[in-house]
Image (cartoon, helix red, strand yellow):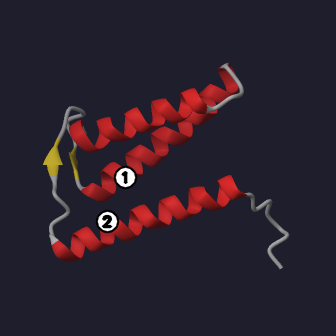
């Protein structure tokens, strides 16, 4: 039934992680409404959801650039992506 896509453990964990992050942000929005809007270093007023979107988009570009320029293994790209995530939620 699910043979139309190559469901591997890394693919499943990626989707579980994204859905968990969205669920956690939903919980935070219910608990603390308003989205925690603030203006960061990019000059944009962002909410938690905006910062999650910027993080996911940047992570995709980091992994694609890593694959195109360096190749495997992807541990370096993972480290850069985690640093990007911390930066986005801290300063953006």
Residue at image position (31%, 72%) is 26
Quarter of the rendering occupied by the C terminus: top left
Which residue appears at 27% of the width and 56% of the height? 48
Q: Is residue 55 above or below residue 16?
A: above
Q: Secondary structure at mark 2?
A: helix
For the residue carrying disc 1, how many other residues have a C-alpha within 10 Å: few (<14), some (14-19), or many (20+)? some
Left or right relative to 62: residue 4: right
Q: Position of residue 36 (x, y in %)?
A: 16, 58
Q: At which x and y percent is residue 52?
A: 37, 52
In the rendered structure, the answer to whether residue 22 lies left or right of residue 62 reads left
Q: Which residue is mark 1?
A: 52
Disc 1 or 2, which lies upstream in sequence?
2
43 or 12: nearer the eye?
Answer: 12
Q: Point out residue 64 in the picture as x, y percentages from the top left corner.
A: 62, 34
Query: Which residue is situated farthest in the top direction here?
Result: 69
When asked about the image quadrant of residue 14, the answer is bottom right
**Mark seen at residue 72:** none
> Nearest the camera: 40 or 86?
86
User: Which structural element holds mark 1?
Assistant: helix
Residue holding disc 2: 25
In percent of width and height, residue 77 lies at 55, 31
Residue at 60 percent across and 28 percent down: it is: 65
Location of the N terminus (image quadrant): bottom right
Identify the image quadrant of residue 85. Answer: top left
Q: Are marks 1 and 2 in contact (CB under 8 Å)?
A: yes
Q: Residue at x 23, y 70 (%)?
A: 29
């Amino acid at each position: 039934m699910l043979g139309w896509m190559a469901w591997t453990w890394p693919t499943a964990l990626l989707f579980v992680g994204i859905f968990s992050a969205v669920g956690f942000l939903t919980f935070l929005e219910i608990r603390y409404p308003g989205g925690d809007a603030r203006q960061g270093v990019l000059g944009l007023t962002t909410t938690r959801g905006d910062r999650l979107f910027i993080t996911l988009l940047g992570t995709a570009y980091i992994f694609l650039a890593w694959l195109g320029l360096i190749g495997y293994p992807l541990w370096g790209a993972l480290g850069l992506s985690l640093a990007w995530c911390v930066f986005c939620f801290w300063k953006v």
